[in-house]
Image (spheres, rainbow, N blue to C red):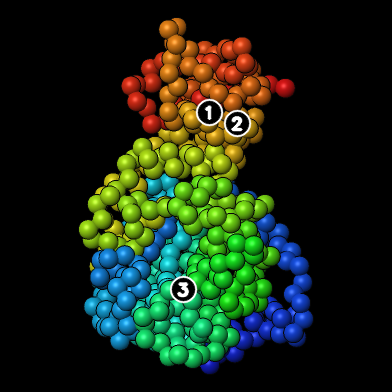
């Protein structure tokens, strides 16, 4: 049941009361107890893994400038230069019902939206700050509340991205690796900043926005020391235990993840990888991202930017995006695919086109993705496998060269026992045999010249 506010005082009394209940050991100065997820939390983790596909949304006043979400930092804008951008932010064409319907049509099962990015701007009516969409823009209305209501109405789950770092808050001091030119004071109380951050999280989790399935943190790395021998060392104490206990105290089923690029911390419920599949480091972001035992997620963009970038036309192909989703599933991970809405609240037509194409593919092939886990065959040059119940889905993403008789070898399949194999969605059997090394060889018919993904269903033997 949503908690309705009857004034800021009542809200803050409620928030502080819950906070005290949620973190008793921390408030007494004791070491926090080992985190034990609730049954609701564990069920949400399992469902998260079943869902496999989510939509990331980066949206804020930076969208008005059309040069990405890091524009304030990248162009060395001061707070005095940046804050007036909010005077222009008026997304009158924002239609959350249309957004959610599009994302459902794409086959996504959840949404993760930036409640607050690194510029500190809040997309809801925050009582802890006036730097929010209600108080600082001509739009003057909460953007998250109607989205939360529409998610509940249309049956899609809601996560909030929340930035740990803040380029505009005066108490974010000592400053980290970013936001050096913002013009903040040369002093501050970092614990006061963390109190502010926790207060805003309490607002989001108070019930006003319904059930929040997860909090997606980012920015921990801003205070990272860069010690190769101790990658978790930071210049300040982020008080993660206190913040995580607050979240789980307010909503015990809420999943906590943190884009910190290191091994998971106590109190986290899922682990994400930025612009990479788990275990990879092609971007250089994740040299210390040791894979833990938590559910996994990879995130990336449809074009090259997270926030709206007017000149970014580098849109990934339908083939590339479907391969990304399938490869993530084959490595036991979800795909969180980003859109950066325009400042008026509309989504770029090229994003709509790609999402629609993904939805059409998933409508036909979703059984091989939803509810699966990483398959028994490690990723190969030809593709990946996913598994569910007694079925192994063999995703042939790149056709191995056929021999003179038409046989194609699927390497790495020696230990995959079969009793039958057919094409997904049909009863048509696939002709197969094993080569001298024990790898499966298949003959693929009526698949076209360059199929995006030939999905074979292998029924396992004993």
Residue corresponding to mark 1: 394
Looking at the picture, how far across and down is residue 148, in whole percent? 45, 66
CA neighbours of label 1 inside 10 A, class few (<14), some (14 to 19), many (20+): many
Q: Choose between 335 and 381: the one closer to the eye.
A: 381
Label disc, if present, on residue 177 of the rendered structure: 3
Label disc, if present, on residue 214 of the rendered structure: none
Say which quarter of the image contains residue 118: bottom left
Looking at the picture, how far across and down is residue 291, in whole percent? 62, 51
Residue corresponding to mark 2: 377
Whether tag 3 and tag 1 are in contact, CB under 8 A, the answer is no
Residue at image point 38% right, 53% down: 301
Question: Quick check: 132 left or right of 383?
Answer: left
Question: Quick check: 362 left or right of 36?
Answer: left
Residue at image point 27% right, 65% down: 67
Whether tag 1 and tag 2 are in contact, CB under 8 A, the answer is yes
Badge 2 marks a residue whose secondary structure is loop
Q: Quadrant of the C terminus?
A: top right
CA neighbours of label 3 inside 10 A, class few (<14), some (14 to 19), many (20+): few
Cα gap from disc 1 to disc 2, whole angstroms:
9 Å
Point out the frontmost of discs 3 and 2: 3
Cα gap from disc 3 to disc 2, whole angstroms:
41 Å
Furthest toward the top, the residue is 405
Point out the frontmost of discs 3 and 1: 3
Q: Choose between 80 and 62: the one closer to the eye.
A: 80
């Amino acid at each position: 049941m949503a908690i309705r506010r009857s004034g800021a005082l009542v809200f803050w009394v409620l928030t502080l009361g819950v906070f005290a209940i949620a973190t008793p050991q921390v408030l007494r100065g004791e070491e926090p107890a080992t985190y034990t997820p609730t049954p609701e939390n564990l069920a949400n983790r399992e469902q998260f893994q079943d869902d496999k596909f989510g939509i990331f949304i980066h949206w804020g006043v930076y969208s008005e400038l059309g040069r990405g979400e890091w524009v304030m930092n990248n162009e060395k804008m001061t707070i005095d230069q940046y804050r007036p951008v909010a005077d222009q932010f008026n997304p009158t064409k924002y239609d959350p019902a249309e957004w959610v319907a599009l994302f459902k049509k794409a086959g996504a099962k959840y949404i993760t939206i930036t409640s607050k990015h690194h510029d500190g701007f809040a997309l809801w009516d925050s009582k802890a700050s006036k730097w929010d969409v209600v108080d600082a823009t001509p739009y003057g209305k909460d953007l998250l509340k109607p989205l939360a209501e529409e998610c509940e109405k249309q049956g899609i789950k809601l996560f909030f991205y929340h930035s740990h770092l803040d380029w505009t808050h005066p108490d974010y001091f000592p400053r980290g690796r970013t936001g050096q030119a913002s013009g903040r004071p040369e002093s501050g109380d970092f614990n006061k900043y963390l109190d502010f951050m926790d207060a805003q999280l309490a607002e989001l989790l108070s019930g006003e926005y319904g059930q929040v399935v997860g909090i997606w943190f980012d920015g921990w790395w801003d205070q990272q020391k860069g010690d190769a021998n101790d990658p978790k060392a930071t210049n300040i104490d982020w008080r993660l235990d206190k913040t995580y206990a607050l979240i789980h105290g307010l909503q015990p089923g809420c999943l906590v993840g943190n884009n910190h690029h290191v091994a998971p911390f106590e109190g986290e419920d899922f682990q994400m990888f930025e612009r990479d599949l788990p275990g990879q480091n092609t971007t250089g972001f994740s040299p210390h991202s040791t894979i833990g035992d938590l559910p996994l997620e990879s995130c990336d963009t449809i074009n090259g930017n997270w926030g709206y970038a007017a000149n970014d036309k580098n849109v990934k192909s339908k083939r590339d995006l479907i391969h990304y989703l399938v490869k993530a599933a084959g490595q036991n991970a979800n795909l969180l695919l980003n859109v950066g809405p325009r400042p008026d609240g509309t989504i770029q037509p090229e994003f709509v086109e790609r999402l629609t194409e993904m939805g059409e593919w998933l409508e036909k092939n979703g059984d091989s993705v939803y509810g699966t886990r990483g398959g028994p065959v490690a990723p190969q040059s030809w593709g990946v496998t996913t598994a569910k119940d007694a079925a192994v889905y063999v995703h042939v993403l790149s056709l191995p060269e056929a021999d003179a008789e038409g046989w194609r070898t699927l390497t790495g399949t020696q230990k995959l026992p079969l009793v039958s194999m057919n094409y997904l969605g049909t009863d048509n059997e696939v002709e197969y045999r094993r080569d001298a090394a024990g790898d499966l060889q298949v003959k693929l018919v009526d698949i076209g010249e360059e199929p995006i993904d030939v999905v074979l269903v292998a029924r396992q033997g004993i």
